[in-house]
Structure formats: C-alpha cells, structure tokens
Amino acid sequence: MTFDRRIRIAPSILAADFAAFGAECRAVEDQGADWIHVDVMDGHFVPNITFGPQMCRAIRPHVRGVMDVHLMIAPVDPYIEAFASAGADIITAHLEAGPHIHRTLQAIRATGKKAGLAINPGTGIDAVAHLLDMIDLVCVMTVNPGFGGQKFIHSQIDKIRSLRAMIGDRPIHIEIDGGITEDTAPLVAAAGADVLVAGSAVFSAGSVAAPEGYGARIRAIRAAAEVARGAP
C-alpha cells in the first residue's frame, strides 16, 4: 500500500447482497472501487451483529485490492490476530472500545498490518494527538456506529478539518464512514478527508447482474470529492 492523498472510494459490504459477497466485491472493484470496507459489529459495542474473521477469510480471495476492516467490537485485542490472519490489510479499532487503545494499536502493528483509529461523533480529537505515531488511518464516524443507511452528521466537518491540521504532513489517511453521497463527499473532501466509505450510496445503485450502477455512483462520488478539493 503506497501512501498518497488521492481520493479513495471504499464501498462498505454492509450494504451489499449478503448471499453474494464474493461477487459483490469483484463487481465494485471492477467498477472502480479502491478499497473494500468491512464493518464488523458485535451486538455489544454497537447494537448490531454482522461479520467475523471467517467471513473476511472467505471473501479475501475475491478482493484484489485493500481489505479495510473496521472493528466495531469490544474488547478488540483478543480478535486482532484472527482478523490479521483472515487477510485484513488495515485493522481499525475504536478509541472508545477499551481503556488501552495504545496497546491495541501496538498489537495491530505487531501483526504487520496497518493500524486505524476510529472515533465516534461524540468523541473529541485531543487523545488522537498522542497516538499519531501509532496509526496509519483515522476513521471519523459521521453517523453513530451500528447500522448502515443513516444520515450524515454535519457537525463532524469541523472535526475533520481539525484532524487534518493536526496530522500535517504525516502519512495518515483520514477516512470518513457514514452517510457519504455525492452531496456530502465534497464537504468532507474539502475539510481534508481522502478515504470515503460509501455503503448504501453505492450498492443501492446496481447489483451483481447490473454492476454499471455501482460504477456510475463511485465515479460520481469521486468526482464530487475531487472537484471540492481542487484536484485536476
């Protein structure tokens, strides 16, 4: 994974056809997706249950690019090795998931994977400053975690802008998860985000049988973000 700040679109398979995950991953990548985002939920840290390491292992052969695994679980540490072994390229843990986030990030890094730090809408960024040497990605939740299809929380835009200033020239991605559409993508890109997680916005536009809709939506979100950021 070579670091740069170009806009990346990461469709969340939480919004895909659960009976056809492999085909869905291939379809969105063929249509221009940069990363595949996997939302792992435990019914404890968040009020929903989704996937585990076995599912990640099953879809890994179908993902040519980056598998971006977002752990909305608590505790995190006992499961890091399992998700690393299942083929995750990035493993993201929540700041709020436990009292020892520095240790968690160390454990992720020890597996050889990229380490991400997610923060909920109600969480400030002061603690992030003390973790910048441990992370490759900050995931800003622009919805409350637990369900797909929620509305974007506009108050998070200032948080994104502050994070971008805090990160400076460090090689750390700012990822946005929640409510990303053609309308909200420009707002977060202009504030400094470079990885946009889009679930319903992408998967509602097509199907495995008609994947062109996926491509149209991915291109539209990317173009809106690039224009807002002033990319050529």
Image (cartoon, rainbow, N blue to C red):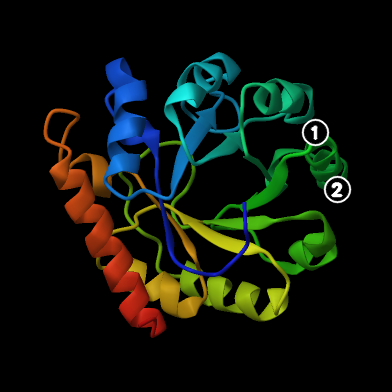
Image coordinates of residue 161 in percent, x first then y, are 56, 78
Look at the numbered discs 2 and 1 and tell me whether their residues touch, using CB distance below 8 Å. Answer: no
Q: Which mark is residue 187?
A: none
Amino acid at the residue labelled 2: His
Pointer 2 local density, CA inside 10 Å: few below 14, some 14–19, many at least 20: some
Q: Is residue 137 above or below residue 88?
A: below
In the displayed structure, does residue 143 sit left or right of residue 179? right
Q: Secondary structure at mark 2?
A: helix
Residue visible at 65% across and 81% down in the picture: 165
Image coordinates of residue 154 in percent, x first then y, are 40, 68
Give the image quarter of residue 167.
Answer: bottom right
In the displayed structure, does residue 144 sit left or right of residue 21? right
Give the image quarter of residue 23.
Answer: top left
Q: Nearer the viewer, residue 164 or 119?
A: 164
Question: Which residue lies most toward the left here?
Answer: 210
If you read the primary sequence from the N terminus, does the residue marked by circle 2 or circle 1 appear first? 2
Quickly name the residue at label 1. Answer: 111
Q: Nearer the viewer, residue 52 or 155?
A: 52
Q: Nearer the viewer, mark 2 or mark 1?
A: 1
Quickly name the residue at label 2. Answer: 102
Residue visible at 63% across and 30% down in the picture: 73
Image coordinates of residue 20 in percent, x first then y, are 29, 19
Q: Secondary structure at mark 1?
A: loop
